[in-house]
Image: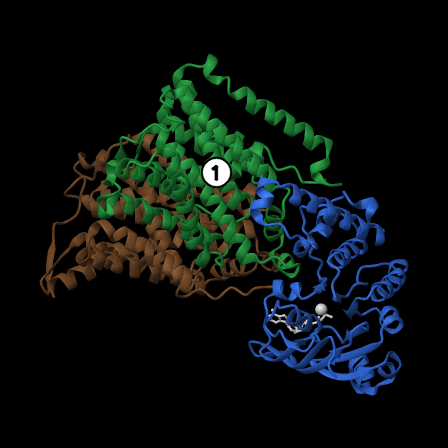
Chain colours: A green, B brown, C blue
Amino acid sequence: MDAAKKPVTRRNEAIGIALWAAGFAIPAFASSSWVAIAAMFAIFAITALSEDVILGRGGMFDMGHAVYFGIGAYTTAILNTELGVPIFLTVPAAVLLAAGTGTLLAAPLIRLRGDYLLVATIGFNAIFVLAMQNNPGGITGGSDGITGIEAPSLFGIPLFSQSAMFWLDWVVLGLVLFLMRNLDRCEFGRALRYLKQDELAATTLGVDARAVKTLAFAVGAGLAGLAGTLFAVQLSTVSPSSFVFTESVTLFAIVIVGGPGSIPGVLLGTALMFVVPEIFRDFAQYRYFVFGIAMIAVMVLRPQGLWPRRRNGL
Amino acid sequence: MGTFVQQVFNGLTVGGIYALIALGYTMVYGVMRLINFAHGDLCILGAFVGLTLLTGTAASGQPGALVLLLAFAVAIVVIAAAGVVLELVAYRPLRKADRLSAVVSALGASLLIENSIMLIWGPNVHVFPAGLLPDVIWHVAGATITFVQVMIIFASVALMAALYYFVHHTLFGTAIRAVAIDQDAARLMGINVNRIIMTVFIVGPALGAIGGLFIGVYYRQAYFTMGWTYGLYAFIAAILGGIGNIPGAMIGGVLLGLFNAFAAGYLSSSWQDAITFGLLIAILLVRPTGLLGEPVAENA
Amino acid sequence: MSGLLELRGLGISFGGLRAVDDLNMSVEEGQIVALIGPNGAGKTTVFNMITGVYKPTDGQVLWQGRDITGASPHRVAALGIRRTFQKIRLFPQMSVFENVRAGCHLQARQHWWQGLVGTRAQRREEAALAERTHAVLRRLGLHKVADERAVSLSYGVQRRVELARTLVAEPKLVILDEPAAGQNEAESAELNDTIFAIRDSGVTVLLVEHDMNVVMNVTDHIVVINFGRKIAEGSAEAVRTDPAVVEAYLGRDDEAEDAA
Ligand SMILES: Nc1ncnc2c1ncn2[C@@H]1O[C@H](COP(=O)(O)OP(=O)(O)OP(=O)(O)O)[C@@H](O)[C@H]1O
Ligand SMILES: [Mg+2]
């Protein structure tokens, strides 16, 4: 039976929508630092979901996803601080530039298999960070980055407050979740699954592997660019250290630890990697030590991830 | 001319170190098809273990060479043991699982080791004690060559020769190569695959510990994130030579060392790493299996 | 004479091995053609060259008179050529329904962004393709196992799922690599009817089969190859008695004696 028509799917979707709607109330009872954490959760959830398009659904080992996130953030930062472009108007540029970079990098890399792709994307991440640090043309601000990014304004009203910013991030997260849910039930999403599970069989059914994979990179990178805009706005500053290789590793780990191709899995992974550490702030120096142990433990005990993808129609 | 010879020697020194570390990556990849992301951190852990022994015994008035030998011996044993534990705990349970699970486990192990170093030795840079080795300096064609450089180059060459002999001319080495080609077939031929993999996790980290300690002795410093930096370089060296290929790792290490030395000598240093990574990507695109790797056949 | 599919002087080498050499054959529209030969004769390799999985080193593949030599697999699929695999290749994490639905990939006209947004037209198309998939499942008697994980089923059923995956695309030519392998006698008898039914629905069939019950009873035309070269061709009757074929399958007498 068609997955979309299954009662379980319907019920899970209803629960998801209810939780998302309830999320809008967070600023009503949480302190402002927790609202900021919730906003960060939304931003990183979008980024992790975008990584999932490439890694989880496409099965392509992208370990340089912070690049696209960074391109979005820098695009918004530069357009806003240098040219005074309003934040919302920088979004198309951020998304398109990130998607364009994803496409450009993907085109030659796609034929690389597994580990080689992983290594190449690590290389691109390193080059990107070095480029931002070296401040080409004096537009990226070097190691210090760019400061003074404006708050976005909606219909002339600037969204200064932490709560308003959170609501904005939350709306965008909802939008991206909607896209991801549709991805599961459209031909593009299916083609990715075919390619991941058996590329040769998929191509003999007419799947154009190159086109579909490139598109996955473009879509994943574009969504990461969108998250990058939100990130730049949230911090009102960007610097190379936010987009280093460790960030890419974290995004990669979120998808695999949470459950590749599983929306709740990726959200859970994001929460574990970004929100839980905030609770244990006092033990900050143990953060990555504990991450390391947790990553090994989860993989050994649950190699499919904490919340694996439910097989459609099964 | 002087600079040229100088860069050659600098390159060979660093290249020898890269090669020693690259061997660990390539051997593990060869038998398990796994990028052991924790390898670089293991090597630097070796540097720290050695450093602790050196600073602890430096004051005791023992001759420097003896102290140094002891430091190497202990580092080798500790890191080889750590390698075995790593294999047993983080990789063995995942042999049959999806490859990505093992990759993430390896990344977790890397974080764990790196941050263990930070928690034990602290986040600051540690300086290696001076005066352990003779301050002999040679002047060759206008270049200055130190005793440390000569020691590292000789030791790396000797170790690589020994490993090459072990892998290509002993029964055990043949078994390692058999497992690398086809694990199932090797098992059917009566080879104990677990033992082979265990051996690889002893030999690789042991060589890596030597490489790590060489880094410490050569640059006279150690810090906890060094594993990533040098690990990544060594890893690029392994890819350059053809990952999974042992002579390839040796050649890749030396070539990368030379390349870096010359890039540092003649090019802007802030773009040096970018150029190295650019080189890596270019190799992957043109010849993904590296200089010595065989092209992978596609099966329908 | 120009058939639906024509192979002209087709050949391929793997290193020093000449797997297929100077193969000429033609498949007429509406026929059931069998390609037979001993193990390792090069039959699967021929299929791989037709479907774009391997690029031939020599010769041509003509489709309706057009040269399609070396076209990539997805382009060959778009021409209406679909295949099954000797070593079954179903999507391991998918149900029978999803596996068969995968065959409709080229029938889906939606753009990717329509899918992401979930437009009404896209959802309507999804529903239509699901219905089309169910129809094929019913036709091949797979509707009862539609929600089972495909690779958990018996070999015989898995082969039928692969067959359904080709038929759902309404191809012009299906290429079946040992469709009877792993099937029991009842299933292989049923297969004969299925193959006739496929042909009667207007689909041309090219198959490789070792099961002589299938080969001799359903085919219009048989091509025999050995060591990559064609050694005989003709009707089932003609091929059965051809001395070269008998020799290829049974070995020469003196060899048989040596072996004994
Ligand atoms: N990718 C490849 N690389 C090297 N050799 C190959 C390759 N594919 C096929 N061969 C060789 O080509 C020859 C023909 O193989 P093929 O699979 O086409 O035989 P077949 O007639 O289908 O046999 P069977 O009845 O056993 O399926 C064999 O010797 C095989 O080993
Ligand atoms: Mg065959």
Please give the residue where the numbered disc 1 appears in the rendered image: A253
Tell me which corner region of the image, top left, top right, bottom left or bottom right, holds residue A305.
top right
Residue B74 in the image, given as x and y percentages of width and height? 33, 41
Residue A241 located left or right of residue B99: left
Q: Is residue B97 above or below residue A37?
A: below
- Tell me what residue is drawn at x 39 percent, y 18 percent: A33
SS type, badge 1? helix
- View extreme (top): residue: A29
- Tell me what residue is drawn at x 71 percent, y 47 percent: C98
Q: Nearer the viewer, residue C209 or B216?
A: C209
| Quadrant of the image containing the C terminus of chain A | top right
Q: Is residue B32 above or below residue C219?
A: above
Q: Nearer the viewer, residue A116 or A23?
A: A23
Residue A109 in the image, given as x and y percentages of width and height? 45, 56
Tell me which corner region of the image, top left, top right, bottom left or bottom right, holds residue B224.
top left
Q: Is residue C236 above or below residue A30?
A: below
Residue C209 in the image, given as x and y percentages of width and height? 79, 69
Residue type at tag 1:
Ala
- View extreme (front): residue: A155
Residue A147 located left or right of residue B6: right
Asked whether residue A66 is in view, the answer is no
| Quadrant of the image containing the N terminus of chain A | top right
Residue C84 located left or right of residue B41: right
Asked whether residue C49 is in view, the answer is yes
Tell me which corner region of the image, top left, top right, bottom left or bottom right, holds residue B253.
bottom left
- Mark 1 nearby-residue class (10 Å; few <14, some 14–19, many ≥20): many
Residue C258 in the image, given as x and y percentages of width and height? 78, 83
Residue B294 located left or right of residue A203: left
Q: Nearer the viewer, residue B170 or C162?
A: C162
Q: Could you tell me how many numbered marks the image carries?
A: 1
Chain designation of label 1: A
Task: Name the quarter showing ligand 2.
Answer: bottom right
